[in-house]
Image (tube, rainbow, N blue to C red):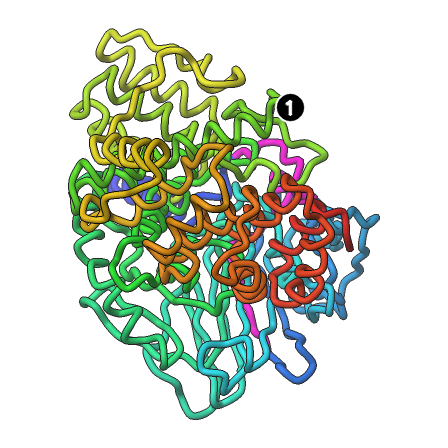
Amino acid sequence: MKKALLLVLISIITITSCHEKKQTEPEIASKTYLEESHSYAQPNDAVITHLDLDIDVDFDSQIISGTATYNIENSGSNQIILDSKFLEIESVTQNGEQTEFELGEFDESLGQSLIIKIKEDTKQIAITYSTTAKTEALQWLTTHQTADKTNPFLFTQGQAILTRTWIPIQDSPQIRITYDATVKVPQELMAVMSAENPKEKNENGVYQFKMEQPIPAYLIALAVGDIEYKAISDRTGVYAEKSMLDKVHEEFSDMEKMVVAAENLYGDYDWEQFDVIVLPPSFPFGGMENPRLTFATPTVIAGDKSLTSLVAHELAHSWSGNLVTNATWNDFWLNEGFTVYFEIRIMEALYGKDRANMLALIGRQDLEDELEALKESPNDTKLKLDLKGRNPDDGMNSIAYDKGYLFLRTLEEKVGRDNMDAFLKSYFKKNAFSTTNTEDFISYLNENLLGKNNITFNTEEWIYQPGIPENAAVIESDAFSNVEKTLEEFLKTNSIDVAKTENWAPQEWVHFVRNFPKDITPDQMQQLDNSFDFTNSTNSYITMVWYEQSILNGYHGNNVDTKIAKFLNTVGRRWYVTTLFSAFAKAERIEEAIEIYKTARGNYHSVTANTVDEMLGVK
């Protein structure tokens, strides 16, 4: 009896120990990774699981230096490979001892492999390094490039493969890690990251951060500046420079309502805090969905909440992109198509179907423009891409966003909204804090939505074929139909009933301006400018489309050329900048564009500058 009891107890202890070990082991340890063309890492051999970052931010030298310490899982390999680009690697240790390392051949897009010698029992590596003047993820801003013009500013932009330019790391979206960070900055500045953040400055300029949920490298983000925080709710709030803070707070005052609307659609918000920091105008994107702290452009501060769909978009990424991430950049549409769909559902829940359909129709027009631009490379109009040998930024366009959205909207109309919502909610829950690819999504779709409801749908045509299938959803907007009628009447009569436009939303004005015919005359544009003062609009979106039309149609009234040059020297948002420089090229005003670019380029982040360099053929 005693011997039998002892055996039972040993069995129970063994089972319990195995269960506890299974619970504490990182999920990443047993994962099989896909082949990755945009990272040198070989995660099936050895993979990072946690980062402890200890860095100093030096504004005088414009260098970040310090040590990146990683916990790793090793499958018996004698080396671990990380990604590095434009970094100075000073030394590397494994398990606390100096070890050998080498940098591979340099590639213009990928940088270099960082090959570190390890042992089979190595659990930790540490890399002491510093950034350089060529580091692409960082933008160091002088005081005059900020809103308050009192202190310098720094921010990072890691998507798609730029985190390797400020941290040596395995820079693949399918490799998710947790991280801690210690960041030392000048005492007059505050540091914030995509992690738990301070709400006010401290006395010594040393800030501690923790991100307990595993995220891919491109979502590790840092901003340093003379910023302040203002809460909107217990879990939402905004950071901005002092002169901007109240404006930002008012503009984004619906953030908590957005979070509630999103949760009602697709389940709990799993990141505890949803804050937004408004950066200086050189920030290259409308927004970047860094977990817990969205980075945003000041161009969305219109004074009337008309451009806050951007906040809804970045919030939606908390599910599609951050919670469930594309495994490779070939699957980028899984991040963005889902997010546009979710964004428009949030906007519909808060502001009604009319506004949601206006946003969707603008996206549909963007998609048609993109299809025209890519007519010589039809393979780039597929949702699933093959970007091997190319920069993943090549796939970050309206195809991923708006064709992806149109696919999901068409699917919703086929299966019904209730079925669609139940499916998406289960999809996010099933894949939470992990990555997926297009093929796995199709399998999940077939099993859990189409097959379950005995529905046939042309999924593979949408995903693997170029262009737009014939069964695409037709998006309609009564508001836009009225806008088009007003424009037609003006073009016929050269007069416009201003009273009809008094209650137009900014999206209606954008639609009005974007749909000018090619034969509109400068005199007609002058008349519209006199009536509505488009050249001096305070809404950046309206301003951008008006400036585009001014360039394309040879309109020079109301000092618009000077205003365009000032706009391009102030705003670094890539979408706006490339739209206007592209218009100069189409209008055969390339020399004028280059003259403006010579003075503007220094204000742009590398993401924007690299795109315009190629567009204008300059360096």
| Residue farthest toward the right in the current orientation of the protein | 105
Q: Where does the magenta region start and end?
A: 32-56
Horizontal and vertical percent position of residue 369: 50, 31
Verify whether residue 26 appears in magenta. no
At horizontal 23% and vertical 58% (from top left) the residue drawn is: 255
Q: Position of 93 compared to 332: left or right?
A: right
Horizontal and vertical percent position of residue 220: 50, 59
Q: What residue would you read off at disc 1?
A: 377
Residue 334 falls in image quadrant: top left
Query: Local crowd at mark 1 within 10 Å, few (<14), some, or many (≥20)?
Result: few
Residue 219 visible: yes
Residue 262 falls in image quadrant: top left
| Residue farthest toward the bottom in the current orientation of the protein | 203
Horizontal and vertical percent position of residue 197: 37, 71
Pick the front one: 606 or 384: 606
At horizontal 36% and vertical 68% (from top left) the residue drawn is: 196
Residue 430 visible: no
Q: Quadrant of the C terminus?
A: bottom right
Pick the front one: 357 or 443: 357
Q: Position of 138 compared to 442: left or right?
A: right
Q: Is residue 184 above or below residue 515?
A: below
Horizontal and vertical percent position of residue 383: 50, 25
Pick the front one: 120 or 190: 190
Q: Position of 88 compared to 527: left or right?
A: right
At horizontal 34% and vertical 10% (from top left) the residue drawn is: 457
Verify whether residue 37 appears in magenta. yes
At horizontal 21% and vertical 63% (from top left) the residue drawn is: 253
What amino acid type should be assigned to the residue bearing mark 1? Answer: Ser
Q: Is residue 442 above or below residue 226?
A: above
Residue 11 falls in image quadrant: top left
- SS of the residue at dot 1? loop
